[in-house]
Image (cartoon, rainbow, N blue to C red):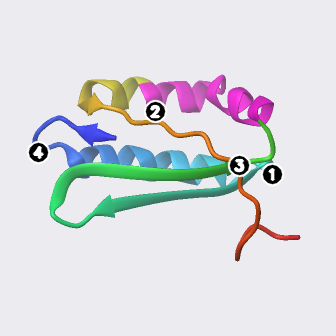
């Protein structure tokens, strides 16, 4: 995600709040908020969910909907990629 100019830190804080929500969700296997050096308005999030239904269910949670609503005004652009993890450290068996 690219935040509106100067709002990268604020967007990061919202995404970290979302990460705390996912800690309670057993179907979320990974939720990592990342910053890009030399791009102060870029915030990246890598997520691994059990399936798309689990991710969709999380987006319907009132707490998550509130975070989304607070993030929207800060977001200038979103680039979204769906991938299928095939293995690696941290993904379990």
15 left or right of 26? left
Q: How far is mark 1 from mark 4, CA to CA?
A: 34 Å
Report how far apart the C-alphas of labels 2 and 3 lie in the structure: 26 Å
Are there few (<14), some (14-19), or many (20+) residues within 10 Å of tag 2? some
Residue occupying the point 33% across, 50% down: 43
Where disc 4 sits, the SS reads loop
Tell me how far mark 3 sits from mark 4, CA to CA.
33 Å
39 and 71: which is toward the camera: 39
Q: Which residue is mark 4?
A: 6
In the rendered structure, which segment of residues is drawn in magenta? 52-68
Which badge, 1 or 4, comes first in the chain's sequence?
Answer: 4
On the image, numbered disc 2 is attached to which residue?
Answer: 67
Q: Tell me residue 46's x, y (percent).
A: 53, 53
User: Relative to 31, is 67 above or below?
Assistant: above
Contact (CB < 8 A) between labels 2 and 1? Answer: no
Does residue 86 sit above or below 6 in this rendering?
below
**Of the residues under marks 2 and 1, which one precedes in the sequence?**
1
Quarter of the image for the N terminus: give it: top left
What distance separates the C-alpha of mark 1 from that of mark 3? 19 Å
Q: Quadrant of residue 85?
A: bottom right
**Pointer 3 or 4: first along the chain:** 4
> Of circles 3 and 4, which is in front?
3
Quick one: quadrant of the C terminus? bottom right
Residue 1 highlighted magenta (yes or no)? no
**Which residue sits furthest right?**
93
Bin the neighbour count of mark 1 within 10 Å (Cα to Cα): few under 14, some 14-19, many 20 and up: few
Foreground: disc 4 or disc 2: 4
Q: Secondary structure beneath disc 3?
A: loop
47 relative to 37, above or below: above
The image shows residue 88, relative to residue 54, as above or below, that is below
């Amino acid at each position: 995600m690219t935040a509106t100019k100067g709002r990268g830190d604020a967007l990061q804080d919202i995404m970290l709040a979302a990460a705390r929500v996912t800690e309670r969700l057993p179907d979320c296997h990974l939720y990592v908020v990342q910053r890009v050096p030399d791009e102060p308005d870029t915030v990246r999030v890598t997520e691994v969910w059990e399936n798309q239904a689990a991710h969709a269910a999380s987006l319907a949670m009132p707490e998550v909907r509130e975070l989304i609503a607070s993030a929207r005004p800060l977001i200038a652009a979103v680039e979204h990629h769906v991938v299928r993890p095939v293995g690696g450290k941290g993904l379990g068996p």
